[in-house]
Amino acid sequence: MNYLITGGSGFIGSHLVECLLHSGHSVINVDNFDDFYNYRIKIRNTLESVGKSFEFPFNEKEHDIQKLIFETESDRYRLYYQDIRDAEGLGKIFRKHKIDMVVHLAALAGVRPSIEQPGRYGEVNVNGSINLWEICAEFNVNKVICASSSSVYGNNEKIPFTETDSVDQPVSPYAATKRSAEILGHVYHHLYHIDMIHLRFFTVYGPRQRPDLAIHKFAKLISSRESVPFFGDGTTARDYTYIDDIIAGVTGAMHYLERNTGVYEIVNLGESRMVSLNEMLSTIEENLSINAKRELLPMQPGDVLRTNADIAKARALFHYRPTTDFHFGIKKFVEWFLRNGS
């Protein structure tokens, strides 16, 4: 199979690329190396995903990425430095390659930054997705997996969160863009018969996690003996999902989509267990053998109180069964963090 992965140099994307290549498939990685965080992190992700070491020196972005493309090109892997908002550029890639399925992971991420730049989040997460689906329709690529988010549930009071719950009251622009993409995706399923699954990821963590996300950010601050921003009283909770379990869920969804037609589904991918902020921080402290200095702060706008996934649908459709205990997952993350000095 020949898969096109948008955002294939990101945290989740690079793990998926690595998994697919190890399974003998061909991969086209489309990524714009956005400066939301240091592009060099994505260069490292890309090299690790294709089994190469992170060695070459850095000068400036355009030069580095062009060298990266040359360094990683092979019979089964192609990297394109491409923004999903550029329909013409996307079209050139689709004309050049026969694509069996698209896995759309590219997006502007982050709840709090979306409050500061709501228009930009709409341009990338909504208009960029429309561009991609238009190209899929034009080139008859009718199998698409899309990354959604548990943030669409907002401050849902019903636990656990089920795909049939109302999600009409988002509390951040990021959440609103993800819900908009789910709805617009159905339009392309209806009009152009594109089989599509939207996967609502629940707080993914593990090696290569983005440095702005809480677990990675806390680990860095604690190891540097700096104060950790601690929002609220520590009882807020998340359904933390280890990256290996997410990749198993994504590939399960891909196999399901390959075998079936007439598909439009929204599916939760989580661990189905809530971990409080207090427990998360203490687990990182334990694995680093360092006590954190907490900077107590009020809850932030756009934050939700808790997330918890009902994964019965994922289990029924594609036998999704997460296996990574949170404490073991943090142990694996900290081992990676200490090796990489991140």
Image: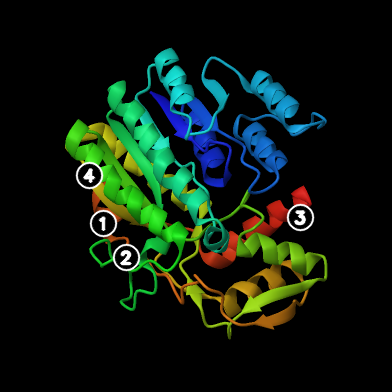
Is residue 23 depicted above or below 163 in this figure? above
Q: Residue at x 72, y 80 (%)?
A: 295
Residue 28 at x, y percent in the picture? 49, 25
Q: How far apart are marks 4 and 3 (CA)?
A: 41 Å
The quarter of the displayed image where residue 329 is located: bottom right
Q: Mark 4 points at which residue?
A: 264
Q: The disc labelled 3 sits on which kind of residue?
A: Leu
Q: In this view, does 128 lie to the left or right of 225?
A: left
Amino acid residing under circle 4: Tyr
Q: What residue type is labelled 2?
A: Asp
For disc 2, the marked residue is: 310
- Viewer-proximal residue, 248 or 222? 222
Residue 65, by quadrant, is top right
Dots 1, 2 in contact, CB < 8 A:
yes
> How busy is the neighbourhood of tag 4: few (under 14 within 10 Å), some, or many (20 plus)?
many
Residue identified by numbered label 1: 313
Crowding at label 1, few (<14), some or many (≥20) Cα neighbours within 10 Å?
Answer: some
Q: Name the residue under label 3.
A: 338
User: Cβ–Cβ below 8 Å for labels 4 and 3?
Assistant: no
Q: Distance between the residues labelled 3 and 2?
A: 33 Å
Amino acid identity at mark 1: Lys
Please report the residue visible at 39 percent of the width from the left and 74 percent of the height from the top.
Answer: 155
Q: Alpha-carbon distance for marks 1 and 2?
A: 8 Å
* Residue 242 visible in the picture: yes
Secondary structure under the numbered disc 4 in the rendered image: strand
Look at the numbered disc 3 and give the secondary structure of its residue.
Answer: helix
Q: Is residue 67 above or below residue 263?
A: above
